[in-house]
Image (cartoon, helix red, strand yellow):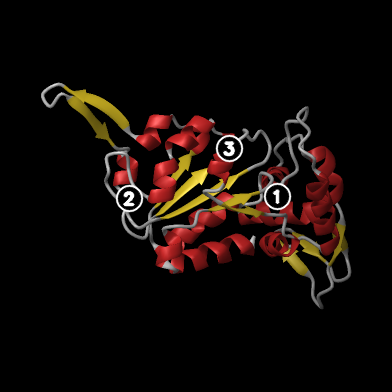
Amino acid sequence: MNEIKDTIEKIYQDEELRETCIPLFLSNPGLGKTEIIKCFAKERGIKCLTEIASTKMPHEFSGIAIPDHDKKRMTFFDYDALLDLKDGDVLFLDELLNTNPMILNAFLTVLEDRVLPSGKKLAKIMIVAAANPQGATIITPQIKERFVWYDIKFNKPAWKQYMSRFLITDEIFEQLCTLIQSENFNSSERNYFTPRSIVKAIKMIIAGIETPYAVKLKPILNGLIENTSENDIVIGDYTFGKNEKISWLKLMQLYKTNKN
């Protein structure tokens, strides 16, 4: 996922590109696109306005025209959330391809010219988008052309670094990666093996909470690990002796029990 962070940082640092280029990161669900984009804003202390595109109505982006009887003309009112953005802020459009094309058409002027329907200039912000291919609506070439498309794939090294907090062995990690890479998002299924869902499921299993993911995950997580240190490891009332083997799951449950 370093590609997302590097791309955002380089575009953001160039003020001209920040106002003209809109990266759209496309990937399967659960790879962490949203988290990376929000962390980018948080690290810089800037506002990140997140708009779930699939939940919006066209007028929330295009504004709305209301008759002014005294002036005998229509008066445009802009979407207040866009008016409140300041120079250097980020507008994040999530689930972009699961929205109605009418919403994207209504937003074209803002995307391209950075001008609100009333004629007011949008602040010098960065616009970033993310989407999943599953359930995507058909969009026109003129909308596609507004974005710079990036196909994001599952990044094993990045996820391994993230999963290091769980002390997972290489063997267990590789088996979890196999589940992720073999997931085809069959519409008849409801529980998918994505990095995000696996992390949640592992935490539930360690806590002893029932989860349908356990059928496939428990045999993997019960893989044995060995104490290769020179000393015994004492965890509460349990002593993990030198050269002794114990399942990874049991060890994590012991750590959690004694931590609480």
In this image, 81 relative to 239: left or right?
A: left
Query: Is residue 32 at least partly visible in the picture?
Result: yes
Q: Which residue was labeled with disc 3?
A: 140
The residue drawn where x is 88% and y is 65% is 244
Q: Is label 1 in a helix, a strand or a loop?
A: helix
Amino acid type, residue under disc 2 in the picture: Leu
| Label whose residue precedes the other's in the sequence (3 or 1) | 3
| Label whose residue precedes the other's in the sequence (3 or 2) | 2
Instruction: Indicate the position of residue 101 as horizontal and vertical percent values.
Output: 53, 32
The residue drawn where x is 66% and y is 33% is 135
The N terminus: image quadrant: bottom right
The reply to whether dot 2 and dot 1 touch (C-beta < 8 Å) is no
Report the front residue among 188 and 26: 26
Q: Which residue was labeled with disc 2?
A: 122
Q: How crowded is mark 2: few (under 14 residues within 10 Å), some or many (20 or more)?
A: some
The residue drawn where x is 85% and y is 50% is 220
Report the Cα–Cα distance between label 3 and label 1. 32 Å
Q: Is label 3 in a helix, a strand or a loop?
A: loop
Q: How crowded is mark 1: few (under 14 residues within 10 Å), some or many (20 or more)?
A: many
Query: Which residue ends up furthest to the top in the rendered image?
Result: 69
Q: Which residue was labeled with disc 1?
A: 195
Amino acid type, residue under disc 3 in the picture: Thr
The reply to whether dot 3 and dot 1 touch (C-beta < 8 Å) is no
Instruction: Indicate the position of residue 236 as horizontal and vertical percent values.
Output: 70, 59
Report the front residue among 138 and 175: 138
